Image: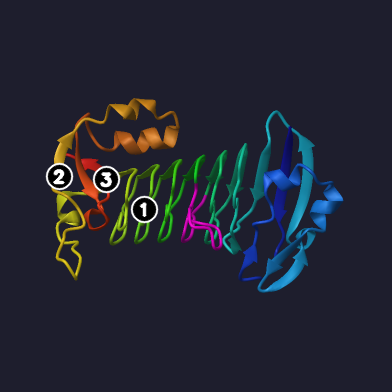
Amino acid sequence: MTRWTFTTRSNSFSKIDIAPVRRSWLAEQTLADIQHQQLIADGSPIDAAEIFDIQIVDSESDEIVIEGDLRNGINTAAMHDAGVFRVCGSVGDYAGCSLRGGTLLVEGNAADFLGAPLGTKKSGMSRGEIIVRGDAGNYAGHRMRRGTITIAGSAGDFLAASMVAGTIGVGGTFGRSPCVGMRRGTTILPKANLDMFASEKSPDTEKSTYTAANLYRPVFFSLFQGELMRSVVSQLGGETVHRIRADRRVDGQGEILFPAR
């Protein structure tokens, strides 16, 4: 097993595509190959060694570590499939896009489209886990198909938009139109209340986005093993919660869980 450590160098780029840095490719390359791998920075190719100081060591498990801030990096951990991809800072748009397995751990904040589809792919993350210890931007979990996203802080607009399945937990506040287009899956929102879901309707049919709330006892919460997700769940304040279904406009059966108070 191997640990690949990428320490960010000072640079003035506004956008760097990190998609080529993935475990399945790294495992077949020498250090020199990785250093000369071309990334796209502000539209131009540049060797990875110009962006990162790269080290490879033996490890008990496969792990990719980004030391330093990567908020100008897009597609971080794209299609990650096994082991841990850890970022000791913040990340830009499309982190964990089309994730296929393993864990993406972001110690800072994540920008827009966390766990969303990569490029022209139709589906977002399909399995695995994304953990963000800070905040996330708009469209977190967009078109998510399976897996778990846990956000300790707040999330932006259109959380879980067009979600197909999976679980999302957000410890903090969230923006407008959560779970729009949601078909299945579970979204856990300890900071939500009934008033937040009362007025969302289709302008064409006047059909409400959300069903009426009912009381529900989610026994599956005991299956969560992650410390951060357990912390989010604990904020619900009891064994019984409110549950509503979304999105009715697409005959969705996804559930939104929030405190029964």
Q: Of discs 2 and 3, which sits in the foreground? A: 3
Kindly identify the residue that appears in the image at 62 percent across and 38 percent down: 82
Q: What element carries label 1?
A: loop
Residue for badge 1: 160
Depth check, front residue: 251 or 47:
251
Q: Quarter holding the N terminus?
A: top right
Near mark 1 (Cα within 10 A), the count class, few <14, some 14-19 or many ≥20, is: many
Q: Where is residue 119 in the image (x, y as percent from the top left)?
A: 56, 62
Camera-side mark, 3 or 1: 3
Name the residue type under label 3.
Answer: Gln
Specify few, some or many for label 2: CA neighbours under 10 Å numbering under 14, 14-19, or 20 or more. Answer: some
User: Within the magenta stretch, is there residue 8?
Assistant: no
Q: What residue type is labelled 1?
A: Ala
In the image, is 231 to the left or to the right of 62? left
Q: In which quarter of the image is the C terminus?
A: top left
Q: Is residue 124 magenta?
A: yes
Residue 253 image label: 3
Earlier-in-chain disc, 3 versus 1 = 1
Sequence-first tag of 1 and 2: 1
In the image, residue 37 above or below residue 243? below
Name which quarter of the figure residue 52 lies in.
bottom right
Where residue 31 sits: x, y (%)?
Answer: 83, 48
Q: Which label number is shown at residue 177?
A: none
Q: Is mark 2 on a helix, strand or loop?
A: loop
Q: Earlier in the sequence, mark 2 or mark 3?
A: 2
Residue 222: name its quadrant: top left
- List the residue tagged with mark 2: 213
Magenta segment, which residues? 108-125
Could you tell me residue 256's position as x and y percent? 26, 45
